Amino acid sequence: MMKRALFTAAAMLLMIFTSVLWAQRPNVYILATGGTIAGSGASSVGTNYTAGQVEIASLLDAVPQIKEVANVVGRQLVRIGSQDMDDATWLLLARRINELTSSDSVDAIVVTHGTDTMEETAFFLSLTVGTKKPVVLVGAMRPSTALSADGPLNLYNAVVVAASPQSVGRGVLVAMNGGVYSAATVTKMHTTNVEAFGAPDAGAVGYVLNGEVHYILPLEHPDDSLHFSVAGLEALPRVAVAYGHAGVSPDIIEAVIGSGYKGIVYAGVGNGNIHKDILPVLEEARRRGIIVVRSSRVPSGPTSLDNEVDDARYGFVASQLLPPQKARVLLMLALTRTDDWQQIQRYFNEYR
């Protein structure tokens, strides 16, 4: 009887201790959107696979170590390859994150996402999610069925980043291949390597090693961070990206002008330079009230204001350090608030 009583008492103490540990762990909510991290292929060494086939529950089951880091709840929001990401899904994702982070029972968010448009989704969320709680995007370059798949470790690292008190107030982050990047500066740098992401103008803000996140720079607390509300928005203003190249034809811009677009991002050459045949068409776009943003197809460096192009003369906006795909995101959101090109330029100046 004595041994049985001691065993029962020990079991109860263990349950209490486990409950205390569980209560002390942060609550991380994972929203799954599909992508390569949830991809499945017939061959473990081939590059052919279908994105978004594996449910979030199965991804979590493959990484039981996550339970030692946080109390995790996973929900499938959509199941797509990120090449098919669209404005409607962005709005859905932003609203869901704002709803979840308003609850005291949620300490952080992780979004599993395909890598093709991850940088755009991260940047959109950084402008539309109103919380200081960590929001971390993560994906993979190899599907879940691949030999040496990178998804499990990436997912573990993302939860480590999200669960860390050091991540509070750092905005939306991307955790890939051991690196931690800001949504404003991260970009996909390689088509196939697991070390696919970087930030050529800023570098990583931190890294994950041995189950801990280490930040390189101290935390800043900007009081006037750029933020746009998407509450009540059913759609975003249409913004096109036109790509500059040698011998580019003006008909690509002419097609946009007559199709109901509110903005054009021109991915110019060099410092956002514009072909002589394109300039008159962009001027016509401005006369019709379409906002024109100059960006660059060059992967590093700013598209600077009033440099080789007289932006003030034409009423053009310079994208500063934002590449074309992120310039489009900011312009869409800016147009929900104003069509004043000078005010929109001030928004872009946040990223000098």
Image: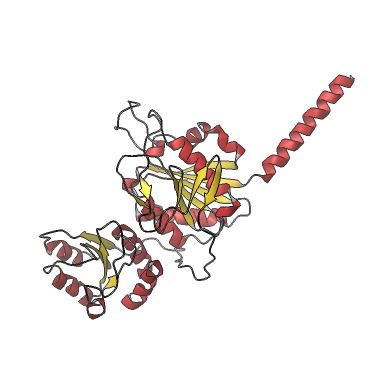
Could you tell me if residue 164 is visible in this image?
yes
- x 60%, y 52%: residue: 165
Q: Seen in the image, is 20 located left or right of residue 334?
A: right
Q: Quadrant of residue 273?
A: bottom left
Query: Relative to the observer, which residue lies in front, 129 or 138?
Result: 138
Q: Is residue 334 above or below residue 103?
A: below
Type of colouring: secondary structure
Which quarter of the picture shows residue 293? bottom left
Q: Quadrant of the N terminus?
A: top right
Residue 271 % position (x, y) = 24, 66
Q: Position of residue 49 (x, y in %)?
A: 32, 33
Question: For the image shown, how many numbered marks are present on the structure?
Answer: 0
* Residue pictured at 54% horizontal, 56% vertical: 99
Residue 238, how many percent across, how many down? Answer: 29, 63
Residue 336, visible in the rendered structure: no
Query: Where, quadrant-wise, is the C terminus in this rendering?
Result: bottom left
Q: Residue furthest bottom?
A: 313
Q: Residue furthest right?
A: 2
Location of residue 347 in the rendering, given as x and y in whole percent from the top left corner: 39, 71
Name the residue located 47 percent from the left edge and 55 percent from the top edge: 172
Q: Residue furthest front?
A: 216
Foreground of the two, 72 or 289: 72
Image position of 137 (left or right of 301): right
- Figure quadrant of residue 52: top left
